[in-house]
Amino acid sequence: MRIDLISEHASPLAAIGGADSGGQNVHVEQLARALGERGHHVTVYTRRDDPQLPDRVRAGPGVTVEHVPAGPASILPKDTLLPYMAEFGDHLTKRWLAEPPDVAHAHFWMSGLAAHRGASGTSIPVLQTFHALGVVKRRHLGASDPSPPSRLQLEAGLARAAALIVATCSEEVTELTALGVPVQRIAVVPCGVGLDHFTPNGRRAARDGRHRILSLGRLVERKGVETTIRAVSEVPGAELVIAGGGDAIADAELARLMALAQECGVRDRVRVVGRIARADVPALLRSADVVVSVPWYEPFGMVPLEAMACGVPVVASAVGGHLDTVLDGRTGALVPPRDPAALARRLRELLADPGRLAAIGSAAAARAQSRYGWDHIARETELLYRRVCLGEQTPTVTVPGGQS
């Protein structure tokens, strides 16, 4: 099949860990690679954010990344990109008139706008993966949500217009049906994990004799690192390693978190290691007794899955994709978001029982290996593509020509 993936702000070639670089980049990269390895011809369209980038880059067997001219060729916050989606869509129109794919799969809502504009007047089916729903983001962030004001309305239209929505977790299905999407037009395919990279066996980062609790990910307030710091103040003797950061937003959040650690009396037990190269992440994960991921909300959550694949127990907030991946008491523990006392209690219980920790880690690795390898995820996604190509009609959606 000819498969086109649209990922307007999250390039599969980008470094992970910045304000707008994270799980979506990894998802698109790994899905494209796995589909290519299955013999498909995959093109990933992403916005050109550097004038020196080539028009096209071969990213693996059967996989090409194409840099789309849409707005200035510079790095911009993703929430400012809406005015350029018409230009992005017009580029897709030209490309698809010349080489129409069998299926187009949009990742993130703005990619959906561009994809539907590009497919207008054609028979190309457009599938949609949101990665994050604006209605959920607005619920948790309120007035501090930086998304364009029109996001919720446009996103609801996309949800109803897609040939099929590929949700990443079961909780998302509930949100989508509330937007008026028939459940029959939603399929759940989770994010995956690179099982050749994230394994229980291998190098471990150096550590001292203390219990190690690890927090890994982007340093933004909603990720809940504050909750983890407050919890660690109630877990005597354990060190907290915080990995992530590397941009101005993260630096400001880190300064706030370190002031909090000082206030909580645990600054001497909190170690910041900054952004970690992707190749070094498994070793850091394996060095931990427990990995903590307690965001306020989480569309999927790839760090817990990566930790599980490395055989490390996870304590995660009971939100989003965590509810699917982490089996409470078996492959980790689930706690309410923004509840330091509950988190501290589960951490103390786990760290006090090395035998249980080991058993949970083994079960976590087995679950990751059996259900979440990228070949398995690509196979499930491919089946959905074939289902859509059998003849389902693709509705149309109106794409704004630059209104935000």
Image: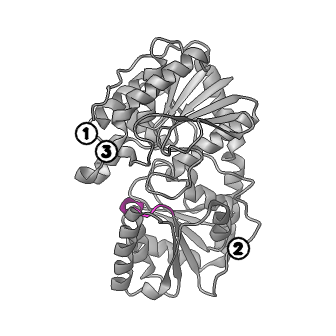
Q: On the rendered structure, is 345 left or right of 103?
A: left
Residue 204 bears which disc, if any? 2
Disc nearer the start of the sequence (2/3): 3
Disc nearer the start of the sequence (1/2): 1
Is the residue 125 above or below the residue 28 in the image?
A: above
In percent of width and height, residue 312 lies at 64, 66
Mark 1, mark 2: which one is toward the viewer? 1
In percent of width and height, residue 35 lies at 69, 34
Residue carrying label 1: 149
Instruction: Classify mark 2: helix, strand or loop.
Output: loop
For the residues labelled 2 and 3, the Cα–Cα distance comes to 39 Å
For the residues labelled 1 and 2, the Cα–Cα distance comes to 45 Å
Residue carrying label 3: 147
Q: Is residue 251 within the magenta segment?
A: no
Most foreground residue, 86 or 300 = 86
Q: Amino acid at mark 2?
A: Arg
* Residue drawn at 69 percent across, 71 percent down: 358
Q: Amino acid at mark 3?
A: Ser
Q: Is residue 223 visible?
A: yes
The region drawn magenta spans: 217-223
Q: Quadrant of residue 150?
A: top left
Q: Quadrant of residue 284?
A: bottom right
Q: Are marks 3 and 1 in contact (CB under 8 Å)?
A: yes
In percent of width and height, residue 68 lies at 51, 34
Q: Amino acid at mark 1?
A: Pro
Q: Residues within 10 Å of mark 2 (few under 14, many from 20)?
A: some
